[in-house]
Amino acid sequence: MTKLSKSSKTKHAPERTCIACRKKGTKNDFVRIGEGRGAYIHRETKCLKVVIKKRGLDRALRCKVPNEVYESLFKIAGVGESDDSGNMENISVRK
């Protein structure tokens, strides 16, 4: 068995997972929601729609997330005014 020297080890870069599509990536690929136990979401409109429609933050953060958080999610994520189909206004938040 060959021993690795300390200088040959590579630094570990932590991976995050999108709560909507479950794809992994680096910290810069995501928007982080919450303090302490946080959740990561891609800046893509389709991932945001999934999180809003299925109330994914409630599950990921293990608490009831106010509707205002879901309603402002697009602004926080820095997504433009429209998605691939042209609208974001038709996205509703379940009560």
Image (cartoon, rainbow, N blue to C red):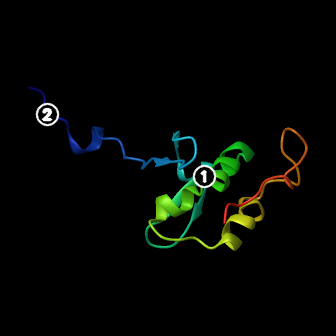
What residue appears at the point 68 percent right and 51 percent down from the top-left corner? 48
* Local crowd size for mark 1, using a 10 Å CA cut-off: few (<14), some (14–19), many (≥20): few
- Which is nearer the eye, 36 or 12? 36
User: x, y (%) of residue 18?
Assistant: 54, 47
- Which is nearer the eye, 81 or 53? 53
Q: Amino acid under label 2?
A: Lys
Q: Amino acid under label 1?
A: Lys
Q: Residue furthest left?
A: 1
What residue appears at the point 29 percent right and 41 percent down from the top-left corner? 9
Q: Which residue is mark 2?
A: 3
- Which is nearer the eye, 39 or 65? 65
* Local crowd size for mark 2, using a 10 Å CA cut-off: few (<14), some (14–19), many (≥20): few
User: x, y (%) of residue 4?
Assistant: 19, 36
User: x, y (%) of residue 54?
Assistant: 60, 52
How far, Cα to Cα, is label 2 from label 1? 48 Å
The mark found on residue 54 in the picture is 1
Q: Secondary structure at mark 2?
A: loop
User: x, y (%) of residue 58?
Assistant: 52, 63
Q: Residue furthest front?
A: 95
* Residue 15 appears in the rendering: yes
Residue 84 lies left or right of residue 95; in this view the side is: right
Q: Is residue 31 above or below residue 95?
A: above
* Residue 43 appears in the rendering: no
- Which is nearer the eye, 3 or 24? 24
What residue appears at the point 68 percent right and 64 percent down from the top-left corner? 70
